Image (cartoon, rainbow, N blue to C red):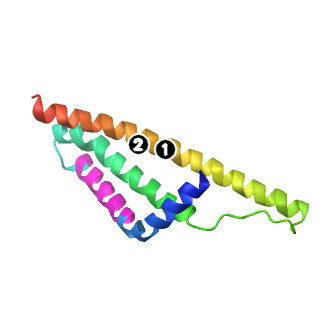
């Protein structure tokens, strides 16, 4: 699992400025919806802007956290160094699970928002 995250983080690492730009545009759009937009626009697009912001931050975090080489256990390490390496890898696994759960939650909410947008556009 960690090797999967590491491979994708290395592919996503050059896109980090794009993720920051998407996050900033999501925050700006949310501010516009909050202070300027009509009630109908706010109800339709508020969840989408929040999801854009959170998803771009998660991808930025993924690219930053997992692009480093993972520590490996070697035979010449002492017992404490092996325990430390195992704890570091365990923390990486916990972070990977947390990022996975957050991405699944944002994907689910994104699909629900997309369903609402499509329903409003084509069925009204």
Is 31 magenta? The answer is: yes
Q: Which residue is mark 2?
A: 106
Q: Could you say whether the residue bearing mark 1 is in a helix, strand or loop?
A: helix
Q: Is residue 15 left or right of residue 4?
A: left
* Up-down relation of residue 114 to residue 62 (above or below): above
Q: Image point 68% across, 52% down: which residue?
A: 91
Q: Position of residue 120 (x, y in %)?
A: 15, 32
Q: Which mark is residue 102?
A: 1
Question: Residue 90 location in percent, x, y?
Answer: 71, 51
Horizontal and vertical percent position of residue 124 = 9, 29
Instruction: Please give the range of residues in magenta.
Output: 19-34
On screen, residue 104 versus residue 82, left or right, reads left
Instruction: Please determine whether, in this image, residue 85 is positioned above or below residue 123.
Output: below
Mark 2 secondary-structure assignment: helix
**83 relative position to 105: left or right:** right
**In this view, 117 is above or below 61:** above
Q: Residue 118: which quarter of the image? A: top left
Q: Nearer the viewer, residue 76 or 91?
A: 76
């Amino acid at each position: 699992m960690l090797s999967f995250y590491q491979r994708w983080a290395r592919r996503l690492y050059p896109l980090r400025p794009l993720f920051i730009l998407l996050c900033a545009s999501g925050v700006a759009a949310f501010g516009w919806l909050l202070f300027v937009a009509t009630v109908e626009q706010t109800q339709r697009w508020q969840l989408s802007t929040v999801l854009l912001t959170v998803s771009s931050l998660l991808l930025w975090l993924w690219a930053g956290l997992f692009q480093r080489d993972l520590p490996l256990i070697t035979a010449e390490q002492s017992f404490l160094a092996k325990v430390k390496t195992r704890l570091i890898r365990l923390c990486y696994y916990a972070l990977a699970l947390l990022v996975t759960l957050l991405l699944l939650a944002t994907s689910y909410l994104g699909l629900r928002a997309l369903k609402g947008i499509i329903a409003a556009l084509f069925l009204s």
